[in-house]
Image (cartoon, rainbow, N blue to C red):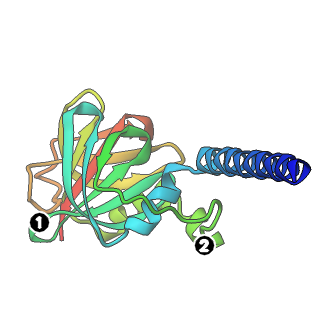
Amino acid sequence: MRWDGLFADLEGQAEALSIAERSAEIEDRTRYETGQLALIDRLRPSIGQPLRLRCLGAVSVSGVLRRAHPDWLLIEESAGREALLIAAALCSIAGLGRQASPVGSASIVQSRLGLRHALRLVARDRSSVRMHLRDASVLDGTLDRVGADHVDLAVHAAGEWRRHDAVTEVLSVPFSAIVALRRDG
């Protein structure tokens, strides 16, 4: 009888040790998998959800996340206004859920549509934009051209169409200086 109690005690200790080892392994795997997540993996499940974002240059944007790419985010602000935010200029995001997409789950097409492609769509649209820069300055105008690492902005009064006599100057702005582009929908 004493032997039965001794073996039962040893079996209980072994079972407890096994459970503790499994728990530790699960915690390690969870930490490892969480460590592999990129911000884009957290953003993708939040498409269609309201977010509050703070960016360099004292730019704050609140609205519904419409598209998410590793290089940029498209936010629909109130009254149909859109903001294209440069991912490298993000400081914080409020409103993300705890969900995450699997690492590397972006489609090949999505992964190829970088910042240059998004800016080319804006330039092709010929809509008036407000460009927020890292130094907290703001420029109004129309994107004339999109190069490999910069845009040419025809500067003119906010909300006006690009007309030759309305353009005060054309500035070349490196992508690295841009925080956000806002335009009315």
Nearest the viewer among 36 and 136 is: 36
Residue 54 screen position, x and y as percent: 25, 41
Q: Quick one: SS at disc 2?
A: helix
Q: Are marks 1 and 2 in contact (CB under 8 Å)?
A: no
Q: Residue at x 32, y 41 (%)?
A: 92
Amino acid, disc 1: Ser
Amino acid, disc 2: Val
Nearest the viewer among 37 and 127 is: 37
Q: Read off the residue under disc 1.
A: 78
Q: Quick one: SS at disc 1?
A: helix
Q: Could you tell whether 111 is left or right of 55 in the image?
A: right
Disc marking residue 109: 2
Q: Residue at x 42, y 58 (%)?
A: 98
Q: Residue at x 18, y 59 (%)?
A: 162
Q: Could you tell whether 165 is left or right of 129 in the image?
A: left
C-alpha gap between disc 1 and disc 2: 29 Å
Q: Quadrant of residue 111?
A: bottom right
